[in-house]
Image (cartoon, rainbow, N blue to C red):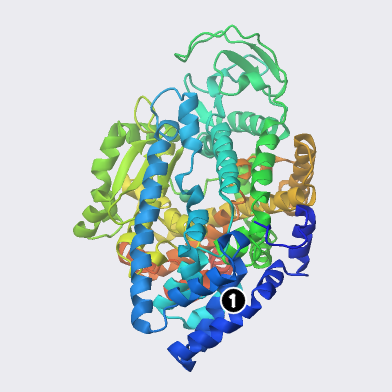
Amino acid sequence: MWSCLKHPLTLPTLVFFIMTGVPSLAQDRTASMQPSVARLESELTARHGEQQRPRIQRGLKQVAEFWRADDGDAVAFEAFTRENFAGDQKSLDAMFTRFEALLEQLDGHMTEIGRVFRNQTDLDLGPIMPFDEAFAGYDPSAHVNEDFFTNKLAFMVLLNFPLTTLEQRLGEGTQWSRRQWAEARLAQRFSRRIPADVNLAIAKAASEADRYISEYNIWMHHLVNEKGERLFPAGLRLLSHWNLRDQIKADYSDPKTGPAKQKMIQKVMERIVTQTIPASVVDNPRVDWNPFTNEVKQSTVKDHDLPASTATVHNDAEPDTRYAVLLETFLASRKADPYSPTAPTLIARRFNENREIPEERVKQMLIQVVSSPLVAKVAKLIEKRLGRPLEPYDIWYNGFRPRGKYTEAELDQIVAKKYPNADAYRKDMPDMLMKFGFTRERAEMLAENIVVDPARGSGHALGAGMRSAKTHLRTRVEKGGMNYKGFNIAVHEMGHNVEQTFSLNLIDHTLLQGVPNTAFTEALAFVFQGHDLELLGLSSPDPRNEAMKTLDDFWGAYEIGGVALLDMQVWHWMYEHPNATPAQLKEATLAMAQDLWNTYYAPVFKQKDVVLLGIYSHMIHSFLYLPDYPIGHLIAHQIEEKMKKAGNIGSEFERMATMGSVAPDLWMKNATGSPVGAEALLSAAEKALAAVDTGKGL
Ligand SMILES: [Zn+2]
């Protein structure tokens, strides 16, 4: 990559220079090509006319910035630009249209290969063989960017279409046409030139982290208290952290036995975060474990059909694997830094390129939520409703959720009966979608574009990439049928699938397929998920339910806001300590988790040094994804308010989702009239609280 430099620099120096901005390597390289650039600027301007000069200057500069010695000498550079500059609108249109159509095919087919190669690891299909893992870890698109520079297709784009900065997209972008946005997205695909071996290393770290997380089950019947009692039913296997957290939520419906179970799960979570969990209890129903004393024994009950094991029973702690896995994702990500000059850290890539909301602005929005004076008021209300002081696990309080008279067990029964298998869910999709207000025609079109598969993990949604392919909804179905947790997640994932279908199949430019960033796809999925009980015919929206739901949203944003701030801090820490050991990363993470807790949570929970904010699995395997959730909550609230006003989820969902991948604030202004922000949620929460104070029956 850097072979064209006269004085090759070592990587750390390189990163330092890029981060401090001087001297620019791109400038160096461009300088050596200056005679060729100047010659071609005159020549092409003479040929295509003075009005093309700005495009010519820009195109030559962009190509020169990425051109390496092995791409060809000055003669080759000149010949290339001479031959490939589209000097009139007609040839530019032809080029744009063809690139758009062919890149759709490329993306779509790569997605299909990736999906099928991961079937064995993603779906509930039995044992995973070593070769399955190798297939799952293989990313067929890893070489595409490099190939496109080698065969010069990337240079053709860079010669003809504009690279843009975040500032331009946030500023000028508000005035761009749809075509201009599509051109900006086309050029952005080639704003980095990351070598294939680096992309493969990242894919491998991601795949290993996924596997570590997807097998991190706790067999709940094997948790025992000091009296040797088992609080959870036989066969219950919960995936950390999703199912554990959701079990805490579910246990609010049973005030008698709930708190003991919730306390026990909190202890399990703390053991995972601090890595004092015995390694032998992870995904192992052959042993019993008291998470309070950490005692492990051979189990006296059998609620599984796994083969017997001769492994000796012991309580040796998991050897900081959680943090070793996280560290590997960091080390792999960092390899891409030198090849991404405009965003030289994963943190910068996440915020400036993926989210297109500056990190500082995200941080401010999150702090606005977690430090809101409303927190103490809502906390007081929760204590009143619970009739006891708050416990740390009450960050997952879900008693504001309108659930009528149904317990989790009853909901499980209702769902299992309705959806004994994934196919039953598939067949019901058109009806479910019509309950959201889609017309029959739309509902059927959407359902036809969603394939339902039984998932190995908690569930996820996979977009299609090309219009001839379908989206996939992966959902977890237990042996006795789907349970309520699985249904709730499936409805969320179905929201993703519907967004994916609209934003690909019904959009004007496939180059704009998708949404501005993943927080938006989460926001749209939250809208679906928030109405899951209505799909079961168990509740309908009324003012009381809506106020409750707002308080639930607020409390959820407060919880996940701290989790996201921790994720951001951990990534900064890793960048500041690139040689850290897993044990050091663990110590630092625990300290930061406690510090955030002590600042924003301890004042209302009245307990210090709690580490629960560190339990999210995303922190380990999702490369700084977590901030998307709280942003998603804020965005979801803005969106839902708008849908409420319009009186129809279906038509508004379609209108918003077909806007595609433009800048976040632009999308939101078009969708709701305001840019992205916390104000909508905070003012709604305040109103909901006021309704409580005036005694309107909450
Ligand atoms: Zn989601």
Three-letter amino acid code at the position of disc 1: Lys
Residue beneath the point at 41% across and 23% down: 126
Label 1 packing within 10 angstroms: few (<14), some (14-19), many (20+): many
- Measured as percent of width and height from the top left, residue 564 is found at 64, 52
Q: Specify whether residue 225 is in view.
A: yes
The relative height of residue 62 versus residue 695 in the rendered view (above or below) is: below
> Looking at the rendering, in which quadrant would you find the N terminus?
bottom right
Residue beneath the point at 53% across and 46% down: 398
Q: In this view of the protein, which residue sits in the foreground, 675 or 227?
A: 675
- Measured as percent of width and height from the top left, residue 575 is found at 75, 51
In the visual, does 257 lie left or right of 500? right
Helix, strand or loop at mark 1: helix
Residue beneath the point at 70% across and 24% down: 292
Residue beneath the point at 55% across and 54% down: 629
* Residue for badge 1: 61
- Measured as percent of width and height from the top left, residue 359 is found at 66, 64
Q: Quadrant of residue 217?
A: top right
